[in-house]
Image (cartoon, rainbow, N blue to C red):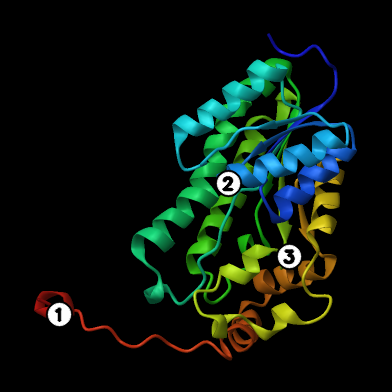
Amino acid sequence: MPGTSSAPTVVITGASAGIGAAAVRRFARGGYRVALAARRRERLEALASELRAGGAEALVVPTDVTDWSQVHTLAQTVLERWGYVDVLINNAGLGRLARLDDLDPQADVAFQIQVNLTGAIWVAQAFLPAMRARRRGVIINVSSVAGWVGLPLYTVYAATKFGLRGFTESLRREVLREGIHVVGFYPGPVATEFGQHAFKRASDRPRAASWPGVALSADAVAEALWDLAHHPRRGVVQPWWMAPLVWLNAHVPWLGDWLLNRVMLRSAKAPKARDPNAEERSP
């Protein structure tokens, strides 16, 4: 039997750390019942205990968004518990950043696509019928500035985020008259674990990422997500000064080519050439 409380509900994927954990705390402070979804149960339980100690209602649903059965279970569990969802934040994502021929075809390419793009589509698909039934709801897809600007070393990551932007735009138009808002959120660098682990080689990490004031805090991003949940817009690039980069990339692409190549590849070394016959000769 779903709960009878009229408190608003939010589902946040990738809730165990970084942007997701900060968003969980922000929405809990705002009076929401929060469903936490991610793969790391221990972190989710610790965060949920923190929220409950502060008087919030939290539901932990360990979920791998690359597994449809787990995504289906997430939606079923939340809806059986609370009956409806007001806000869905598709935040689960990861990066494997390196030159394309340095990426493992399965662990780096296929898995990145499954998490960042297929997973977001599946989660939205699982919760959309409940929102349609109420003719209300907000879906926020957390993309990246890399969903507007293709950066060197971000080949597959950018492909997933460009794809997520296209999905967001199309779904927004699909449900436009049904009372459901679909929002694209495009942050620049954020000070989370993502930046520590995404680059396969530390030497590939651009120096600009460590400049003071460049990386957003997870709390600042969570505040932006809170604002978008209550004042939905088609899409928001954050911080504001990233918007000129998006404009430059669209209108003066040759300058974007030159600038981004110098910023992103100054320290990145090309991988050693691989011998296509090496596998055949190996014992």
Where, quadrant-wise, is the C terminus in this rendering? bottom left
Q: Quadrant of residue 82?
A: top right
| Callout 2 secondary element | loop
Residue, disc 1: 277
Q: Residue at x 60, y 83 (%)?
A: 264
Visible residue check, residue 230? no
Residue, disc 2: 40
Q: Which of marks 3 and 1 precedes in the sequence?
A: 3
- Identified by mark 3, the residue type is Val
Q: Where residue 190 is drawn, which disc sits there?
A: 3
Where, quadrant-wise, is the N terminus in this rendering? top right
Q: Residue at x 67, y 77 (%)?
A: 252
Report how far apart the C-alphas of labels 1 and 3 lie in the structure: 41 Å
Q: Number of numbered discs present? A: 3
- Identified by mark 2, the residue type is Arg
- The one of 139 and 82 positioned closer to us in this rendering: 82
